[in-house]
Amino acid sequence: MTAPPGDDMLSRGLRLLTVLADNPPGLGVSAAARIAGLPVSSAHRLLGRLAAERFVAYDEDTRRYALGVRVLEFSRGFQRSPAGYSAAADPLRRLAARTGLPAIAGILDGDEVLLVLSVQGSQHLQLRSAEGTRNPWHATSMGRALVSTLPAPEFEALLAGDLPATTSRTLTDPGALREEVARVQTRGWAEVDEENEIGVRSVAAAVPYADGSRRPRLAVSLGAAVVLTSREELHACVPALLACAEEIASLTA
Amino acid sequence: MTAPPGDDMLSRGLRLLTVLADNPPGLGVSAAARIAGLPVSSAHRLLGRLAAERFVAYDEDTRRYALGVRVLEFSRGFQRSPAGYSAAADPLRRLAARTGLPAIAGILDGDEVLLVLSVQGSQHLQLRSAEGTRNPWHATSMGRALVSTLPAPEFEALLAGDLPATTSRTLTDPGALREEVARVQTRGWAEVDEENEIGVRSVAAAVPYADGSRRPRLAVSLGAAVVLTSREELHACVPALLACAEEIASLTA
DNA sequence: CCCCTTTTTTCCGTGAGATGGAAAGTGTTT
DNA sequence: AAACACTTTCCATCTCACGGAAAAAAGGGG
């Protein structure tokens, strides 16, 4: 009777995987079904198949499901996919070593910035920035650096979209954002000060690709804890940041 | 007519994803179908759905498929799944900083060692060791450290299995391996010298968990290029390695 | 200890939709 | 131009996914 309209077995299975990915530890069948919006019996069947192929791990004692080891195969494959974000890994590592700050790289995915590479700095401060993390474009320095390279209509579309405030300092006014991005465009790098996360400031630059490159545009960023690094100190790292972006561009040419 | 026996839409879709993960850059429909062992029209349909949900990326111009950004969600979720391999990240980072060598952590998955965490050393040498990589247990130090903690029957089953030689120096004789693992058991750490990859030697130790812990057992390892680090120098790092393993055990207790 | 609730697991009749061969469309090579 | 390889669309067949329901199992009080 009730049908799956544009919602087949494959989508449902993948939906369950994302549910398991987003909800910390181990979920039971019914909990997973509830969150994924599926009938319990369907979720049970799907989870069983996923477990048989070890994309999910099933704990027989607790009867809970979690992501399985095989999902790692995917992320490994992803790193070397579009001409390799891996090419950016070495320059990024050098940048982190030179500045002592955590360095990350990300791409624009819809209206979010997706973190695709991350290397921790030498300071004991560890920012929680795992690969796969998403943040709204307008609250991050990478996001602003990336949108500053976008054609006007696409940029305006983003401005017209949802602009949630993640902290009390987040810029959410379209006009102010437009101005800020214009500044980024002329200056060549972007900055954010506790607008995405209290206690964290960062600078970022987009990697300049040769014209016509249809490769998803990458941005590199340096982060710092406000208590350890002043704006001036962070700004002093900008030349190194830009050099890193240039280096990546030359490698992936 | 021809039916999918135990091979449903979900398995096929995931198979395509792994095919895309394992075969470097961009695959066309027919290439992917060939490798995955699917009819072209089925592969076409499945890839289309995967692309619609952005688990695969489709390049309209080249008509090639690659893994999409959403697969990163999975690996991110995996890191914090079984009580968190992420807890091991900090000790591992310290180990790498202290020794200047790349430090990695892995688990035993079937007869392979799966690399789940990796931090690069400070030397400019970069071992190619990405998370998600698999290696045969008997050719790696982590593998030997891990099997040394296994109950005898499970260990014997592994010994009876396939023992491929990945280099000319790989130990493949079951008797010799049994002896070697016995040595690992008494000594508390394992060693491998160009048996998995020419030019690389490594030491490893299993993380000692409290008895009864059903958590997949983790091993930590230090790798080095033979041209840069002698066996003696690497052995000198073993105390730090063992301390790191202890630290992880205490954190995840 | 038993009853009650919640969750997990099994079962099965129905029909939506997955399937794959074939043909059309597209671009590249000989 | 023709031959080839690949991508994309189409469609008639019949499989296998679907989910409600019931059974089984696991907790949770009192």
Image (tube, coloured by chain):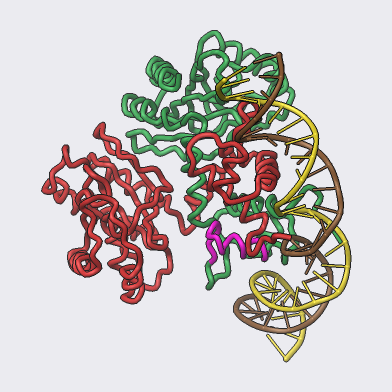
Chain colours: A red, B green, C brown, D yellow
Q: Nearer the viewer, residue B122 or A100?
A: A100
Residue at position x 16%, y 41% from top? A229
Left or right? Give the position of A48 relative to B247.
right
Is B56 part of what is drawn in magenta?
Answer: yes
Total of numbered circles in the picture? Answer: 0
Question: Magenta residues, as a range?
Answer: B44-58
Q: Is residue B227 visible?
A: no
Residue at position x 72%, y 66% from top? B41
Q: Quadrant of the N terminus of chain B?
A: bottom right
Left or right? Give the position of C25 relative to A107.
right
The extreme top residue here reads B186
Residue at position x 39%, y 28% from top? B92
Q: Is residue A33 above or below residue A82?
A: above
Residue at position x 28%, y 55% from top? A165
The extreme left residue here reads A232
Q: x%, y% of residue B179?
A: 64, 12
Q: x%, y% of residue A228?
A: 16, 37
Q: Quadrant of the C terminus of chain B?
A: top left
Is A38 part of what is drawn in magenta?
Answer: no
Q: x%, y% of residue A160?
A: 33, 70
Quadrant of res B91:
top left
Q: Nearer the viewer, residue A160 or D18?
A: D18
Left or right? Give the position of D3 relative to A109.
right
The chief SS type of the magenta part is helix
Quadrant of res B134:
top right
Q: x%, y% of residue B112?
A: 62, 32
Q: Is residue A228 visible?
A: yes
Q: Nearer the viewer, residue D8 or D7?
A: D8
Q: Is residue D6 above or below residue B87?
A: below
